[in-house]
Every structure is written in structure tokens, then in C-alpha cells.
Image (cartoon, rainbow, N blue to C red):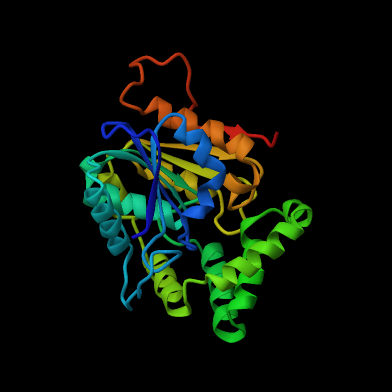
Amino acid sequence: MYYKVLGEKNADAETVVLSSGLGGSGGFWQPQLAMLAEHFRVVVYDQHGTGVSQGTVPAGYRMEDMADELAGMLNELEISRCHLVGHALGGIIGLHLALRYPALLQSLVVINGWTKLDSQTRRCFEVRQNLLLNSGVDAYVQAQPLFLYPGDWLSEHDALLQEERQHQVAHFQGMENLLHRLQALMNSDLTASLGQVITPTLAFSCKDDLLVPWSRSVDLASRLPNGEHTQMLYGGHAMSVTDPETFNPILLDWLLRHSSQASATPSGHLPTETSWPKH
């Protein structure tokens, strides 16, 4: 898979791996890269069959396969321990990674994730799937921002969205690849397994997320032996893009708290439940 390594160059540097959602492209994390690179070695990658990571995603593909692919990439990079930050599908990859390779993860951040698919998320996925099958790639891409961003942000960034639409159509991952990845995500059910995830995990939600109700992150955190929940009040499903000024300090606080250099008794940290307003 295609990847970039940014920030600290020392082979022993603490590493943060960024895993994107259904789109799969590492470009999703652009608003976080500079901040993270000041403190960590940062690995950002395009998931198999997306972006620059060319390839065919087979029928019967599973979230476990995505976790194995990421573990293989980290082995290639000789990374034996890391923090993983995953958005939606990327966070579900992280949970499967924590189950299959528990020694690999120092901490995990699951942004707008879930234990098993919620009816609202299923409804949104089915609408998007029908658009792709019945109306084509351009219609799918045109509708995608409706599920990701708040209405006022959409209105204020129309020119950017038009530019992104052209780019995303030109670099679309392919209908079969997307459908197979989507089916893997929809089939994932971790209800019976989360008690085995010992990795310290932050379930990070956004109150106005249309695609994934914030209550799914609360449920996720409650099922994890070392789970915490925190929430932003504004930003939609992709709040790391729409409001990085609020998102980035929360993420950095978590990562520094769980770094190997962190004090055993830090002077301050996030409570297990908090809501963060829009700046």
C-alpha cells in the first residue's frame, strides 16, 4: 500500500498511524499532519484499492483483511508499536487490529465509530449505495458531502466542494472496490469481542454527526475495558476537517497522555466524558 512517513525521522520515535474512512485516502488527514509531525513520526496511507494504492478488492472482503493489510505495512516499516487514529471505517480497522495484534497498539482513537452498524448509518449507506448503482459515480460523489459536513459549512465552502468533486470523480476508487469495502464495514459486528480489547481507546464523537449518531461512540466506550468518550458539539461526521481548531488539541492531548514519555501523574487531562463547543 502507498504510504508517507512524516515528522520525526528517528527509527525509535513514537509513531502515530492515521487511517481514513470509507474514502480510504490519506489526504483526509491534511489538517492534522503539521500538528502531529511536531511531536511524532506520522504514517499516513491509502488503504488497499483506494487512492494511489491500486488493486482489486475481492468479494467477501472483511474488516479483518484491512487490519491484516495494515499490520503487514507496519511490519514492512519495522514499526512494532504505535498509536492508531482512525476515522469511522479506519477506527473499525483499529478495533480489529487491537483484537488481532494487541501488542502493536499503544493507544487507539476511534472517531465516529461504532460497535455494530446503527439503523441510521445503514440508512445513509443504503442511500449512497443506491445512488452509486443507479445514478453513477458523479451523483455519488456529489451527494457525499451531505453526509460528512454541517449545512453552514457546506454553504461557506461551495467552491472548495466543487473542486473536490472533480478530483474525487477523477480518482474514484472504482465501483466494485467501494461496494466490497462498504459491505465489509456494514457486516462488522464487534459486540461479542470488545471486552477483549485492552488497548486504551478514545471513542471520539460529534454531536451533529448525521451519518453516525454520537450515542454509538458512548456505547462503544462503555464496552471497552479501557475506553473513554469525548465529544465535539459541532463539525459533522468529518469534524477533523471542518473544525480542526477544536479537534486537533483534543487529539494531541490524548496522544501525549498515552505516549511512552508521559508522566505517571500528568498535571491535567481530559475527563472520561466531556463536550467541546465550536470555537
The quarter of the rendered structure image containing the C terminus is: top right
How many marks do you count on the picture?
0
The quarter of the rendered structure image containing the N terminus is: bottom left
Q: Position of residue 106 (x, y in %)?
A: 30, 36
Q: Position of residue 262 (x, y in %)?
A: 36, 21
Identify the image quadrant of residue 228. Answer: top left
Residue at the image position 52 percent from the left and 72 percent from the top: 172
Locate residue 96 relative to residue 185 in the image: left or right. Answer: left
Q: Position of residue 192 (x, y in %)?
A: 29, 55
Residue at the image position 34 percent from the left and 50 percent from the top: 95
Q: Is residue 81 visible?
A: yes
Identify the image quadrant of residue 134. Answer: bottom right
* 161 in relation to 76, above or below: below
* 128 in relation to 104, above or below: below
Locate residue 255 relative to residue 154 in the image: left or right. Answer: left
Residue at the image position 48 percent from the left and 28 percent from the top: 253
Identify the image quadrant of residue 47. Answer: bottom left
Judged from this view, the residue extending furthest toward the bottom is 134
Q: Is residue 272 visible?
A: no
* 179 in relation to 70, above or below: below
Viewer-side residue, 34 vs 185:
34
Residue at the image position 41 percent from the left and 58 percent from the top: 46
Q: Position of residue 206 (x, y in %)?
A: 59, 45
Locate residue 36 relative to residue 96 in the image: left or right. Answer: right
Viewer-side residue, 147 vs 45:
45
Judged from this view, the residue extending furthest toward the front is 9
